[in-house]
Amino acid sequence: MIADYLSGISTLTLVIHLLDILLVWFLVYKLLTLLKGTRGMQLVKGILIIIGLKIFFNFIGFTTMTYIFDQVVTWGVLGIMIIFQPELRRALEYIGRVQWTNILNFNYKDVQKGQKDHIIKAVATSARHMARRRIGALIVLENNTGLDEYVESGIEINAEVTHELIINIFIPNTPLHDGAMIINKDKIRAASCVLPLSDNRSIASSYGTRHRAALGLSELTDAIVIAVSEETGKISVCQNGKLTTDFTDEKLMKYLEENWQQQNEKIIK
């Protein structure tokens, strides 16, 4: 029967169906990757459970329960848009910043590697220095999502990135030590910036406002946020709504080399 069905379909139609299936698989994979480690993953699990129960009740003939779950699915879409607005915003921003030229396999040339290495070393060195001395710090490395609204909440600096300046800014009781420093391209754009706090309830209670702010920004943008704890002296990194701790300066340098991608890093040959 399957062979008879396939024999009646042209090769072109089969190829189109195959590409259709592969595209759906790719989009689902990208969606799950994007939501991994965020509230959105719990949302996906909840949706699957509701759909499963709806199918189950419909199969065994529970009319009332089927109707109830139909209403849950219908009105749930509106509820999802309201409750999970940060995740939806993040997903749309991800779509907007996709480097389509990479998909089309254009040739690129790295024009700022030496400069990027210098910034990464300065950030890692200053993070190590402050961690050893229990100096709290919050350093943001901007990626493709613009951070102008957060820059405007602080004091603009537009200075060269050096580990001496980074340390100086976070020295306790100095005018700019409170809040976050934002680095974009090859400049420290601003300091004393206010970041949004995460309302993720799964984060350990031992983490304070600094780490919640780092996680909060990483949930809304693709920035890399480095938090140095003044209580424990530990270095933590937040990216894509995920918090990882216990970084050494060497581990931090390697992480930034692999994950910090700036828009102006590459040009087409």
Image: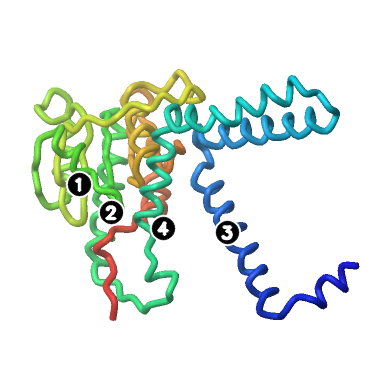
Corner quadrant of residue 128: top left
Q: Secondary structure at mark 3?
A: helix
Q: CA distance from mark 4 to mark 3?
A: 23 Å
Q: CA distance from mark 1 to mark 4?
A: 20 Å
Q: Nearer the viewer, residue 233 or 244?
A: 244
Q: Earlier in the sequence, mark 3 or mark 2?
A: 3
**10 Å crowding of disc 4: few (<14), some (14-19), many (20+):** few
Q: Position of residue 117 (x, y in %)?
A: 28, 60
Q: CA distance from mark 2 to mark 1?
A: 8 Å
Q: Position of residue 214 (x, y in %)?
A: 34, 33
Return the residue at label 1. Answer: 163
Q: CA distance from mark 3 to mark 2?
A: 36 Å
Q: Are marks 3 and 2 in contact (CB under 8 Å)?
A: no
Q: CA distance from mark 3 to mark 1?
A: 41 Å
Q: Position of residue 102 (x, y in %)?
A: 40, 70
Query: In the drawing, what numbered circle is on residue 26?
Result: 3
Scheme by which the image is coloured: rainbow
Q: Amino acid at mark 3?
A: Phe
Q: At x 73% / y 34%, what residue is drawn?
A: 52
